[in-house]
Amino acid sequence: MTDEQTWFITGAGRGMGADFAKAVLAAGHQLVATGRDTDRLAEVLGSSDRLLTVKLDVTRPADAEAAVTAAVERFGRVDVLVNNAASFYAGFFEELTPQQIDRQLATSLVGPMNVTRAVLPVMRKQRSGHVIAISSSAGLGAGFEFVAAYAASKFGLEGWMEALRAEVAPFGIHTTIVNPGFFRTELLTEKSTSYARASVADYDARRAPLLEYWQAQNGQQTGDPAKLAQALLTVAGQEPPPRRFIAGADAIGTAEQKIADLRADIESNRQLSTSLAFAE
């Protein structure tokens, strides 16, 4: 890749995506900034010869195809795709409706698939490219309440990305999963978080403290998204880029606990697990 690259970022109008977009422009790259509200994109990012803002709802494959076509018409290529757009449907699994689950998966799992499907023909033609998926520490370990739908979307995102890596590597295309911990973004605001409605009495005693906890976290997260944006540029510039970047000390803690849990699970039934082959 050349020093100047063309980046394509989803959900670039607010939150973490806006920080990513600003960092990319400040580094001198060309940027295709996408989101559902183009006025918001212009307000946040301003105007530049190196900037193209495009309307994109990641749940609509036709939007993704049109956005990629516009990107190629303007800049001729796409070097780095950042699948960042996401939402958060919080609540006990039994109280989340099937429609809420569908919307969570549509935005945070199927949405990145839609955009990547549109970008890959361009990258295959180039025989180069880098697909980055913004996952979460909840995509590594989710042994806590209120994140069933969100974790399902992020675990799915990670499984898809790991398989995709093997499929596109022969074309010179890299993939990276990013696992941020708690960063001070807009994810926990009313614009991005939807809560399940109370509907199961057995959860009543636990629901109020959890709602209070999650709402209190907004604006108190320890991670600085501007620093994460700079880290993303660093990671994207590595040769080769990593398969995974675990972002934040809290995310590392989650990953280390997951490793410890897996080791314990293996050892707890190692003899039984290794006794399951056909007897010769």
Image (cartoon, rainbow, N blue to C red):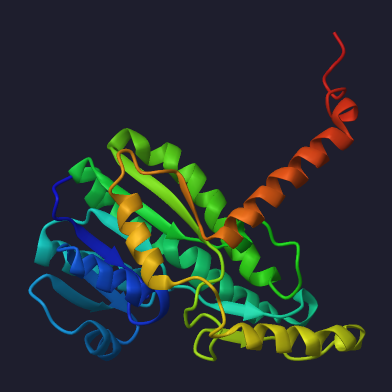
In the image, 276: left or right of 72?
right
In the image, 208: left or right of 55?
right
Quarter of the image where the N terminus is located: top left
Quarter of the image where the C terminus is located: top right
Q: Position of residue 52 (x, y in %)?
A: 17, 74
In the image, 211: left or right of 106?
right
Which residue is at the far left? 49
Give me the residue at 59% from left, 54% from top.
252
Give me the residue at 31% from left, 67% from top.
9
Instruction: Name the foreground residue: 210 vs 248.
Output: 248
Q: As displayed, is residue 161 above or below residue 114?
A: above
Give me the residue at 85% from left, 83% from top.
206
- Is residue 243 visible in the rendered image? The answer is yes
How many numbered marks, from 0 up?
0
Instruction: Name the foreground residue: 11 vs 211.
Output: 211
Q: As displayed, is residue 67 above or below residue 280?
A: below
Q: Position of residue 11 (x, y in %)?
A: 37, 75
**In which quarter of the view is residue 205 placed?**
bottom right
Which residue is at the far top? 280
Q: Position of residue 243 (x, y in %)?
A: 45, 44
Give me the residue at 48% from left, 83% from top.
186
**In which quarter of the view is residue 30 placed?**
bottom left
- Is residue 66 visible in the rendered image? The answer is no
Q: Position of residue 123 (x, y in %)?
A: 25, 48
Instruction: Name the foreground residue: 67 vs 181.
Output: 181
